[in-house]
Amino acid sequence: MNQKLTKSLDNAALAVGFVLFFGIMVSGDLRHSLGVAVGYLIGWMPSILPFHLVLFVLAAITGLYASLIQKYTMDWDFLRAQQEKMRRLQRDMREAQLSGDQARQQQLQTEQMKMVSEQGKMMQMQFKPMLYIGLISIPLFMWAYLYIEQNPGMTMTFPFWGTHPINATVIGPFLFWYYWYFVCSLPVSQIIRKALDIGSMS
């Protein structure tokens, strides 16, 4: 009974994550509604913190949540084993090509074909956490997007770049606040992963 309930909750969470992940790409109403809903929970933060620190807090929350999801939903031993197997296969293939060993090359090509199905399992294993992570990160991101849209005059001062409106573009569609958010999230995520001893692929 508990396993069935857990599986049902798991499927429901994945379904919601799927809707959020793809829904925000096509529905402006969904993006707006998410931003408004999250505003009831964290809309007070800009009144006590500069907005660049608010973005830092959001990045930290996302980093912690994402790290925990990856820690408990991904089979790191399997992923490391697959990566090592692929490296060994590539190394053996180079050696066989250099030595002109046709029989060995055919054998290795057969092994490569067998790994295709395992690659599919790896992709599925990595895609599932993305949907879980989206349950938290997407609503937070939509709130930040809505808040900035409603307060277009905000600026930030960047090293070497000077002061810019945070909703101005750095390059292409990449906005300054996107840049700051991801600059914050990368080191925070690394610190959290180190603290929680979350495995890496290397």
Image (spheres, grey):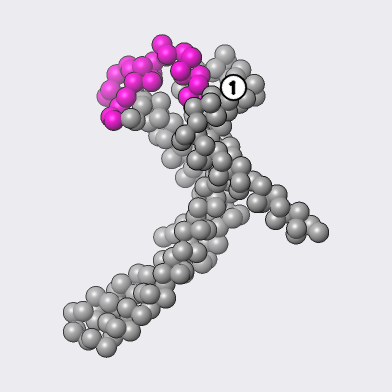
Where is residue 180 shown, x and y percent of the image? 40, 29
Query: What residue is drawn where x is 42% and y is 72%?
Result: 115
Query: What residue is drawn where x is 40% and y is 34%?
Result: 183
Residue of label 1: 36
Where is residue 156 shown, x and y percent of the image? 38, 18
Where is residue 98 shown, x and y percent of the image? 18, 79
In-front residue for pair 180/127: 127
Can you say whether 123 is above or below 167 in the image? Answer: below
Query: What residue is drawn where x is 55% and y is 29%?
Result: 30
Residue 59, visible in the rendered structure: no
Query: Label 1: how many residues lie within 10 Å, few (<14), some (14-19) or many (20+)?
Result: some
Amino acid type at circle 1 is Val
Can you say whether 77 is above or below 33 in the image? Answer: below
In the image, residue 155 lies in the stretch drawn in magenta: yes
Can you say whether 90 is above or below 24 in the image? Answer: below
Query: What residue is drawn where x is 43% and y is 40%?
Result: 186
Horizontal arrangement in the rendering, residue 36 relative to residue 148 (left or right): right
Horizontal arrangement in the rendering, residue 170 relative to residue 65 (left or right): left
Q: Quadrant of residue 174?
A: top left
In-front residue for pair 167/35: 35
Q: Quadrant of residue 32?
A: top right
Count every numbered label the image shows and give the total.
Answer: 1
Magenta residues? 143-172
Q: Quadrant of the C terminus?
A: bottom left
Where is residue 71 shown, x and y percent of the image? 57, 53
Q: Quadrant of residue 36?
A: top right
